[in-house]
């Protein structure tokens, strides 16, 4: 199984400041044949389903504000919110789809306003 | 745009079978992959399994012995059955479209239902 970990568990950031969330996989999710990282990021607000933000580690889903960006490769990934807005308060999850026999999610990182 | 809606009993007794249906609108179910994902109250996300529109399936090994996912293309629906439930199966259950491209995938979950809370209790 590919185990996903995230850090920190939670963070509080001032409005307009940068928020950085880290995600680490227990083995590489970089597929060498196409040089793609099989990693996605989701945002979940209270009482709502998760919403896809980023796929292939760095491709923003249509309609997602450009203050959200994904980076990283192999086993270490980062989701950055460049200028935190009030509506970004949520829990953020990473997910690997390298192993299609068992999709796994990280435990989540809660983002709040300081 | 694809929309998904879960339906089914909100309360199931221990040892019985949980049954949920996901109705797809705004697109045909006869393409790609469809998944079930659950989230216990206050906890993280767990992928349960997926089905390809042709009927082939793949399940989370931790649940495989108790899970069946099926598809009804005539109704544009797919379904989840989870047998021998316990309190640990209490969760919000989501259905989701699982993105793929012809010949490869599935990959990530791009469309989700709103979720339905299923409580296991006598």
Image (cartoon, grey):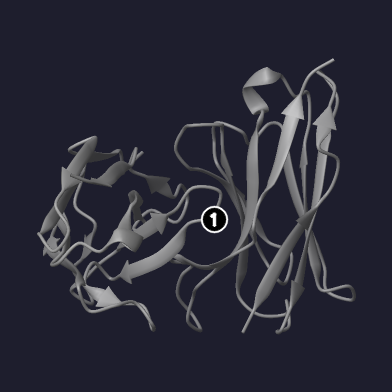
Residue A4 vs A81, above or below: the answer is above
Give the residue displayed 30% in from the left and 59% down from the top.
Answer: A86
Q: Position of residue A50 (x, y in %)?
A: 48, 57
Check the picture and name the quadrant holding the C terminus of chain B: top right
- Residue B8 percent across, percent down from the top left: 84, 47
Give the residue displayed 14% in from the left and 52% down from the top. A14
Q: Chain of mark 1?
A: A
| Rendered location of residue A42, percent (x, y) | 38, 59
Q: Give the residue at the far right of this rendering.
A: B74
Asked whether, in this view, residue B82 is left or right of residue B40, the answer is right
**Image: B44 above or below A85:** above
Near-viewer residue (A18 or A59): A18
What is the tally of numbered marks visible in this picture?
A: 1
Instruction: Locate residue A62 relative to residue B57 in the image: left or right.
Output: left
Determine whether A24 is above or below A44 in the image.
above
Please name the residue shown 64% across and 61% down the image: B113
Q: Nearer the viewer, residue A30 or B97?
A: B97
Residue density around tag 1, few if under 14, some if 14–19, many if 20 or more, within 10 Å: many
* Residue B72 shown left or right of residue B50 in the figure: right
- B38 on left or right of B78: left
Q: Secondary structure at mark 1?
A: loop
Q: Who is closer to the viewer here, A98 or B19? A: B19
Q: In the figure, A44 relative to A80: above or below?
A: above
Residue B81 quadrant: top right
Residue marked by disc 1: A49
Kindly tell me whether residue A75 is visible in this rendering.
no
Is the N terminus of chain B in the top left, top right, bottom left or bottom right quadrant?
A: bottom right
Q: Residue at x 15, y 57 (%)?
A: A78
């Amino acid at each position: 199984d590919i185990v996903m970990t995230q850090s920190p568990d939670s963070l509080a950031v001032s409005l307009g400041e940068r928020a950085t969330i880290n995600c680490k996989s227990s083995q590489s999710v970089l597929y060498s044949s196409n040089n793609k990282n099989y990693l996605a990021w989701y945002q979940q607000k209270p009482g709502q389903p998760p919403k896809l933000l980023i796929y292939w580690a760095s491709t923003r889903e249509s309609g997602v504000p450009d203050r959200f960006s994904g980076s990283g490769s192999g086993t270490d990934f980062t989701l950055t919110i460049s200028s935190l807005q009030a509506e970004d308060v949520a829990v953020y999850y990473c997910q690997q789809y390298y192993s299609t026999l068992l999709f796994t999610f990280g435990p989540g990182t809660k983002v709040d306003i300081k | 745009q694809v929309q998904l809606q879960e339906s089914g009993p909100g309360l199931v007794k221990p040892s019985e079978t949980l049954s949920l249906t996901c109705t797809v609108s705004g697109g045909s179910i006869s393409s790609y992959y469809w998944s079930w994902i659950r989230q216990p109250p206050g906890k993280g996300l767990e992928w349960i399994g997926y089905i390809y529109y042709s009927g082939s399936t793949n399940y989370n090994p931790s649940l495989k012995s108790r899970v069946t996912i099926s598809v009804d293309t005539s109704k544009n629906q797919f379904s989840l059955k989870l047998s021998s439930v316990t309190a640990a199966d209490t969760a919000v259950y989501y259905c989701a479209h699982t993105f793929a491209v012809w010949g490869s995938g599935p990959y990530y979950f791009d469309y989700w239902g709103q979720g339905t809370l299923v409580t296991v209790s006598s």
